[in-house]
Amino acid sequence: MKKALAVMTALLLVFSLASSACADALSDILEKGELVVGASVGFPPYEFYYTNPETGKEEYAGFDMSLAKGIAEELGVELVISDQSFAGLITALRAGEIDMIISGMAIKPEREEVVDFSISYYTGSQIMLVRAEDYDTLKTVEDMTGKKVGAQMGALQAEILEEQFSNAEPLVIDQVALLVLDLLQGSLDGVLLTDMVAKTHIALNPGKLAISEIPVNYDDVGGVAVAVAKGDNESLLEVVNAYIEQVTSDGTFDSWVDTAVAQNATLIDTEEE
C-alpha cells in the first residue's frame, strides 16, 4: 500500500512538472516583462541594421522588426532581439532561449512538426524585373524567347528560369546587384527576383525599372508567419494572430513594407557609391 502510494505520488509530481513546463508561454512573457524574439538580422527588407540619419545610431529595421515591436507593445512588455543564425532559430525556440521567431520564416510541413505557426502575415511572390522602357513589350513568357534573363545562383529563381523560361538565354550568377546592373545597362532583358527585392531596386532606380506582367509560376509554401514553441500556446497565438489580422487589414503592415524597402534602398545606394 505504501509502495503504491509512493508511486502515485511520484507520478503526480511528474505530471505536475510536465504541466508546468508546458504552460502557455504568454504568462511567462508577461511575468518577466520582456519578449525575446529570435531573428537573423541580415535579410533585408525583412530585417536588417539601419543607421538612423537623425540620431546616427544603428537600429533594427525591416517589416519583421516592426511586427516584433508591435507585438511587444500589444503585450505591454520590452522587446529583446536575439540576433543569430537562421539555421539555429528553431533549436533556440525549442530550448526556451527565445519566445518566438519573427525572421521571414515560411510555413513548411517539416517545420510544422516541431513548431506552431501563427497565421501568415506576408506571402511573397516571384516576379520578372524589366527596364521600364520594355514594360509594354515584355508581357508574356513567350515574349522572353531568345531574351537574356538573369537569376541568382542556387536560388529558387534559378530553378524557375530553367523550368519556365527554357527558351530564354540564361545568366546565373551569385550577386543580385550585378544582375540588376546588367539589366540597367542593357546586357540583360529581365531578372527573376522576389517582389520585395525587386521593389528595393525600383526604389533605388526610380523610373528606370518595373515589375513585368509576365506570370511567374512557383509553389507557394504557405506564406511567412511567426513561430512559437510547439505545445500549449493557444493564448499567445491568439494575441499574435489578432494583432496580425489588425495590422494586415488596416494598412499598417503595408506601410512597414514601404518603409523597409525605402530604407534598404538607401543602404544599397550607400554601399554602391
Image (spheres, helix red, strand yellow):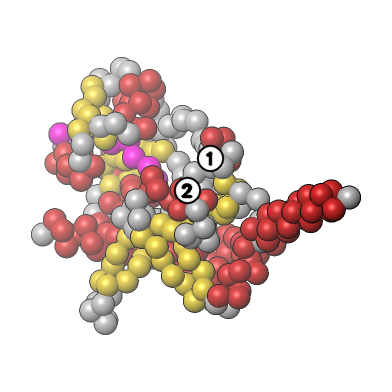
Q: Where does the image place residue 101, in percent across and percent down from the top left?
A: 49, 55
Residue 11 counted in the magenta span: no
Residue 26, compared with residue 114, is above or below; it is below
Foreground: disc 2 or disc 1: 2
Please give the range of residues in magenta.
Answer: 187-195
Residue hosting label 2: 90
**Is residue 182 in view from this perspective?**
yes
Spatial CA span between label 2 and label 1: 9 Å
Q: Residue furthest right?
A: 1
Residue at the image point whose x is 51% and y is 73% from the top: 34
**Dot 1: what SS?**
helix
Residue 213, compared with residue 28, is above or below; it is above
**Dot 2: what SS?**
helix
Q: Residue furthest left?
A: 273
Badge 2 density bin: few <14, some 14–19, many ≥20, Cα 10 Å: many
Residue at the image point whose x is 61% and y is 49% from the top: 230
Labelled pair 2, 1 in contact (Cβ < 8 Å) = yes
* Front-lying residue, 127 or 83: 83
Quarter-of-image position of residue 27: bottom right
Number of marks in the rendered image: 2
* Front-lying residue, 170 or 42: 42
Residue at the image point whose x is 28% and y is 21% from the top: 168
Q: Where does the image place residue 133, in percent across and percent down from the top left?
A: 26, 42
Q: Is residue 138 left or right of residue 172?
A: right
Amino acid type at circle 1 is Arg
Q: On residue 111, which mark appears? A: 1
Q: Is residue 272 left or right of residue 200?
A: left
Task: Answer with mark 2 or mark 1, whichever residue precedes in sequence.
Answer: 2
Residue 203, compared with residue 171, is above or below; it is below
